[in-house]
């Protein structure tokens, strides 16, 4: 999946927490969110904040689908609330290869 397809897919599945998302879909979306926030932050901090709020729900949805692809519950995103250690664990899970037979398919 390329950058354009990943962004389109994430906007089409804006609040869809069911199913699976591949590594490329998640990481292209994360790059889109980061670049959009950085570029809009140069223009205006308010625009950056609005963009971040607008992309928060699809970010959570694609992260949940990504965790489903690794046979984990989407609720495990809450581990990211633990400073530093939680972020490392969550990034490790999100970067893992997906399972071929997922219970979340």
Image (spheres, rainbow, N blue to C red):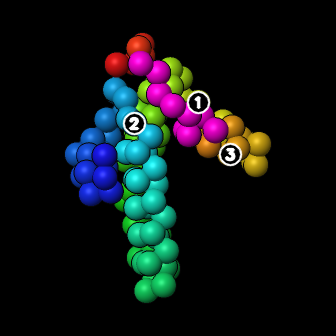
User: Disc 2 and disc 3: Cα gap in Å?
Assistant: 20 Å
Tag 1 secondary structure: helix
User: Disc 3 and disc 1: Cα gap in Å?
Assistant: 11 Å
Observer-nearest of 31 and 61: 31
Tag 3 secondary structure: helix
Q: Residues within 10 Å of mark 3 (few under 14, many from 20)?
A: some
Q: Position of residue 28 (x, y in %)?
A: 40, 53
Tag 2 secondary structure: loop
In the displayed structure, 31 sits above or below 14; it is below
Q: Which mark is residue 76?
A: 1
Q: Position of residue 62 (x, y in %)?
A: 40, 41
Mark found first going from the N terminus, 3 or 1: 1
Identified at 41% across, 33% down, the residue is: 65
Identified at 49% across, 79% down, the residue is: 41
The answer to whether mark 2 and mark 1 are in CB contact below 8 A is no
| Residue 50: quarter of image | bottom left
Observer-nearest of 60 and 32: 32
Q: Residues within 10 Å of mark 1 (few under 14, many from 20)?
A: some
Question: Would residue 50 be visible to someone looking at this image?
Answer: no
Q: Position of residue 37 (x, y in %)?
A: 46, 70
């Amino acid at each position: 999946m390329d950058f354009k397809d990943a962004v389109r897919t994430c906007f089409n599945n804006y609040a869809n927490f069911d199913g699976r998302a591949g590594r490329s879909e998640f990481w292209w979306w994360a790059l889109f969110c980061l670049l959009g926030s950085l570029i809009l932050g140069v223009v205006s901090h308010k625009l950056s904040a609005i963009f971040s709020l607008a992309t928060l729900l699809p970010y959570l949805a694609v992260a949940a689908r990504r965790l489903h692809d690794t046979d984990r519950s989407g609720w495990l995103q809450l581990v990211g609330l633990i400073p530093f250690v939680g972020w490392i664990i969550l990034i490790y899970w999100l970067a893992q290869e997906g399972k071929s037979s997922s219970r979340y398919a």
